[in-house]
């Protein structure tokens, strides 16, 4: 269960945090570097339009995250039972982390401002829900109902489900859809912001 901090819960927590740290730590740097060297403007003037730039950066960020996911799976392979769910969680979780990283990279100007936003936004909206999801039994039902809708909490639940013997679609399908929907919405916002820069 999510509330028992045994080896499965710690493994799920480490998997979730690894994806968040890589996606949110490295992906914004891809855009910060382009802005610093003024190559983003050149890219946007080239035949590659904003969507291509976003896709390229997303693929690079996804590769970083998936390398981290492979490493964390190697250390926790003995605990994973449902590999399809684990891989789906890793891919969708990495895409979400990359989408958030790209959004921060587009909206913010410097790595220093990223650190400020990490404390002000990322911790309460992405780290705290994961921690709270592991304390589900100790929280009021109303708080649990809100925490369930945070994609980061959904990601940790998927990793937990990947370590259980029984994981029907009704349990992991909605969490996967929540993460996929949040990812798509964020990527649309990123593409829109890059298109504004393109003008």
Image (spheres, rainbow, N blue to C red):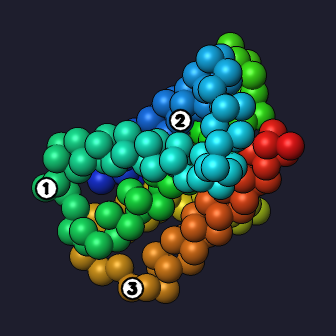
Q: Position of residue 22 (x, y in %)?
A: 44, 35
Q: Which mark identifies residue 78? A: 1
Which of the two discs, 3 and 1, labels the residue nearer the N terminus? 1
Depth order, front residue of 196/108: 196
Task: Check whether the beta carbons of the residues at disc 3 and disc 1 lie within 8 A of each other.
Answer: no
Q: Badge 3 is on which residue?
A: 168
Q: Secondary structure at mark 3?
A: loop
Determine crowd level at label 2: few under 14, some 14-19, many 20+ residues with C-alpha closer than 10 A: many
What residue is at 62 percent from the left and 49 percent from the top? 48
Q: Which mark identifies residue 6? A: none
Depth order, front residue of 139/196: 196
Q: Position of residue 160 (x, y in %)?
A: 37, 61
- On the rendered image, what quadrant is the N terminus found in? bottom left
Q: Position of residue 64 (x, y in %)?
A: 37, 40
Q: Position of residue 4 (x, y in %)?
A: 40, 53
Determine crowd level at label 3: few under 14, some 14-19, many 20+ residues with C-alpha closer than 10 A: few
What residue is at 13 percent from the left and 55 percent from the top? 78
Residue farthest to the left? 78
Which of the two discs, 2 and 3, labels the residue nearer the N terminus? 2
Q: Which mark identifies residue 27? A: 2
Q: Secondary structure at mark 1?
A: loop
On the rendered structure, is 156 left or right of 55?
Answer: left
């Amino acid at each position: 269960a999510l509330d028992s901090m045994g080896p499965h819960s710690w493994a799920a927590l480490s998997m979730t945090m690894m994806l968040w740290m890589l996606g949110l730590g490295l992906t914004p740097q891809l855009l910060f570097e382009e802005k610093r060297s003024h190559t983003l403007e050149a890219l946007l003037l080239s035949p590659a339009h904003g969507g291509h730039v976003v896709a390229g950066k997303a693929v690079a960020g996804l590769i970083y995250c998936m390398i981290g996911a492979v490493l964390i799976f190697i250390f926790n392979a003995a605990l994973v039972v449902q590999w399809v769910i684990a891989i789906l969680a890793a891919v969708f979780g990495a895409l979400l982390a990359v989408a958030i990283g790209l959004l921060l990279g587009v909206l913010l100007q410097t790595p220093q401002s990223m650190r400020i936003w990490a404390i002000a936004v990322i911790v309460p909206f992405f780290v705290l829900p994961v921690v709270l999801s592991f304390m589900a039994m100790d929280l009021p039902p109303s708080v649990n109902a809100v925490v369930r809708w945070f994609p980061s909490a959904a990601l940790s639940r998927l990793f937990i489900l990947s370590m259980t013997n029984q994981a029907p679609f009704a349990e992991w399908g909605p969490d996967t859809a929540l993460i996929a929907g949040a990812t798509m919405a964020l990527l649309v916002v990123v593409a829109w912001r890059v298109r504004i820069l393109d003008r």
